[in-house]
Image (cartoon, coloured by chain):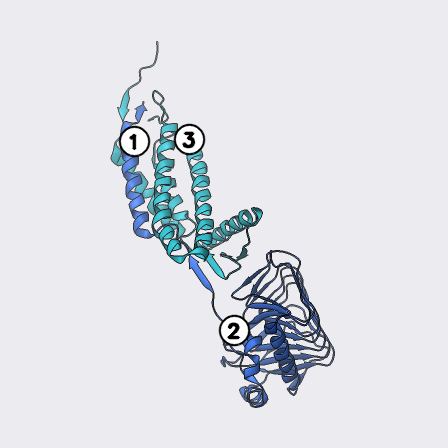
Amino acid sequence: MKFNRATASVVGLLALTFGPPKAMAQLSSFGVLGGSTVTNTATPTIVNGNLGVSPGSAVSGFPPGIVTSGSIHAADATAAQAQTDLTALYNQLAGNACNTDLTGVDLGGLTLTPGVYCFATSAQLTGTLTLDAQGNPNAIFIFKTGSTLTTASGSTVVLTNSASSCGVFWQLGSSATLGTGTSLVGSIVALSSITLNTGASVGGRLLARNGAVTLDGSQVTFCTGNSGAPFLQPPPQTQNISNAPAMSWPVLAGLGVLLAGLGSVLARKAQVLG
Amino acid sequence: MPAMTTVTKLHPLRFALAFTCWALLAFGILFTPPVQALDVRFSRVLVSVAHGLLTGCGGHAARDGAILRAPGGFGVEMRDGCNAVNVLILLWSAVLAFPASRNMKALGLAAGSAIVQALNILRFISLFYLGQYSMTWFDFAHAYLWESLLVLDTMVIFWLWVRHAVRPGTALYARA
């Protein structure tokens, strides 16, 4: 199951040579892109980045779902361009030759190094899949399935040795269904639909060409680490987080002195009966 | 024949010393790794409560761990020191150091904690909205307004509790 850096480099070089990186600029800004609909069935769903649908136009459940660092594009030119990019990305991923055939093998419990992994039909993840980049932060992992990707409840993908969620791609012949509480990383690039059951989260992107994207108390956050090159450009990082300390330490010390003084004055007035 | 009682004044330094000891002990405990982990969880609970209040009142926000996010991308994170536990420690130390009955101390701890945390959640929600409107206002409210209000609030809580605990003509602290 192990692959060396040379394999990853070849994969990256081929994609870099034949891929259309400029065309992916629009798509790179999307956290969620659906073909027919995008539906959120429960709060609190959070999508980091643009959320779009095209050629369909129905986006429901936002709000109460939240889109951060992006906006909703329903059947507009931006979403249409992103869908065009998505088709190119899908074909680009599909065109990568397989390094390993994992047909019939559950991904749970495996530790995989960079490379292209293929499933003739469906892929199943039950438990924990570990992706080991072997110290290469630009490592690429590609999973190709003939049909579906299904994860059991609570399944997880763990990244080790500099692996980046931006370097993980799931190219699916039909659809993805993530079980309750699943924590997946990477960009899901599906021909039809993507469904996240309650509480499932993805550190990457949900990109469906023809079908629906369904979310349920989900969190979709942009991938982190490498840019995702050569397939996608870096996600926009426009988060604006402020922390809110209740009290700075000097003021806290001042409050301590004030309380000590007030208490001393009040204690002096208090009487003790003995 | 009625028992003889003597009336004496408490030495003010005794309170100051006890207060300092309680505060040092509590902060020492707060910075131990297990309690720090609980502290982080507590922050998340507070953010959950703030999120529940916001959405319950029709507001739009999403909770992401200890971060409260707005649709526009702005978020307020409750990090260490944001959950007002350090303020509570000072209030608890003052209540514990002050001579009062156990029941009164329990009342002071519980009511004081509830009021301080209610104010802290209000502070957090207000900062969440202020940050979306103007970071200048956010910084002002964050650094000056709410700090002053929390100081005032803690002092008033303690003062009111002492007034309640030590009523004229009653002895709530009996020297053995």
Mark nearest the camera among 1 and 2 is: 2
Q: Which residue is mark 2?
A: A235
**Label number found at residue A267:** 1
| Quadrant in the picture for residue A89 | bottom right
Question: Disc 3: which chain?
Answer: B
Instruction: State how far apart marks 1 and 2 are (Cα).
Output: 61 Å
The residue at the far top in this view is B1
Question: Disc 2: which chain?
Answer: A
Up/down of B86 relative to A181, above or below: above
Number of residues whose C-alpha sits closer than 10 Å to that of mark 1, classed few (under 14), some (14–19) or many (20 or more) = many
Up/down of B70 relative to A192, above or below: above
Residue closest to the eye, A10 or A79: A79
Q: Is residue B53 visible?
A: yes
Q: Secondary structure at mark 1?
A: helix
Q: Which chain shows up in cyan?
A: B
- Residue A160: x percent and y percent? 53, 74
Mark nearest the camera among 2 and 3 is: 2
**Label number found at residue B104:** 3
Number of residues whose C-alpha sits closer than 10 Å to that of mark 2, classed few (under 14), some (14–19) or many (20 or more) = many
| Disc 1 + disc 2, Cβ < 8 Å | no
Residue A18 appears left or right of B126 = right
Residue closest to the eye, B124 or B157: B124
Q: Amino acid at mark 3?
A: Met
**Which colour is chain A painted?**
blue
Up/down of B83 relative to A6, above or below: above
Residue closest to the eye, A111 or A78: A78
Q: Are marks 1 and 2 on the same chain?
A: yes
Q: Are marks 3 and 1 on the same chain?
A: no
- Residue ID at (57%, 85%): A20
Q: Amino acid at mark 1?
A: Ala
Residue closest to the eye, A161 or A21: A21
